[in-house]
Image (cartoon, rainbow, N blue to C red):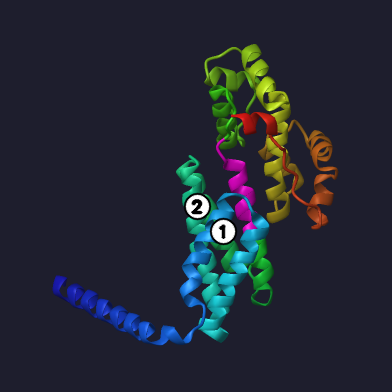
Amino acid sequence: MGKIMQLHQHSMSETISKRYFQEIDNINQYIGVEEFFNIESKLIFEIYHLESTKAKKSLHELIDILSIRFGKQVIKIVRGYFSVLSSIVARKLLDNQVPSKKAFAFNIACNDMIENQMKDAEFLQFADDLIDFFVYFIADRKQPTFRHQTVNKVIMYINDELENDLTVESIANNFHISTSHLSRIFREHVGITLVEYLNVRRVEESQYYLRHTNKSITSISDQFHFCNQSYFTRIFKKYTGVTPKHFRDELHHEFYRFEMAETELQNA
């Protein structure tokens, strides 16, 4: 049995090697291929630095190169490349100290979307949507850089535990500080109260589920521990300007994002 496996592995290695050398012989006829990895490096930099417009342009350039090389097979190849790109971004999430189970779930979700939601006729639009999703997801998980390390740790803790029933008291207990001290330093550095920030993050995260899942609004409200759907609707509209139902039904509504205190971040 072991000898059969060795023969199979040897045969596979020879097959791959043969295909590799065939490609080396053919590659010179395809203009621009040598720039692929330079553009890819630029794309990854742009995604990591949340430059979505530039990243979309770079991804389109990569797709153009793949089109030159693969012709009519390009959509199949692009689908595979999107999966590779998702894995690269998942590793960036790990670098940003996102729990491994969440990075893994992100990768699985992306690949499921690529496999089941990407329509061949709209693959360029899908590329843009994928970049938007990458940038939005990374932005939510970027390391905060406030001057108070407890505040930074609290923000990261909230990001990781958002679907639990978090309160000011439970967060303060987790960091072994008083609720009054936590509330004071959080507002001083972030610019809003901790209660407001919890609502902001719940609204931001709930947008994904409204736009990309079939979960009911009540279920999403419960998932993020709003006391009832009416309160969820009121808080959601306060920050986004529309109700959860309108956000789900009207796809032109952009995702709401809370902007951190810029002066604190710039001077950190």
| Residue 213 visible in the picture | no
Q: CA distance from mark 1 to mark 2?
A: 10 Å
Q: Are marks 1 and 2 in contact (CB under 8 Å)?
A: yes
- Does residue 193 lie above or below 247 as drawn? above
Question: In the rendered image, which quarter is residue 259 located in?
Answer: top right
Mark identifier at residue 239: none
Query: Label 2: which residue?
Result: 90
**Amino acid identity at mark 2:** Ala
Count residues near mark 1 (Cα–Cα under 10 Å), then give few for <14, some for 14-19, many for 20+: many
**Amino acid identity at mark 1:** Cys
Classify mark 2: helix, strand or loop: helix
| Span of residues in magenta | 130-143
| Residue 47 visible in the picture | yes
Q: Is residue 68 magenta?
A: no
Residue at 67%, 16% in the rendered image:
184
Q: Left of 131 or right of it: where is 218?
A: right
Q: Looking at the image, is mark 1 or mark 2 nearer the viewer?
A: 2
Count residues near mark 2 (Cα–Cα under 10 Å), then give few for <14, some for 14-19, many for 20+: many
x, y (%) of residue 136? 64, 49
Question: In the rendered image, which quarter is residue 154 located in?
Answer: top right
Query: Label 1: which residue?
Result: 110
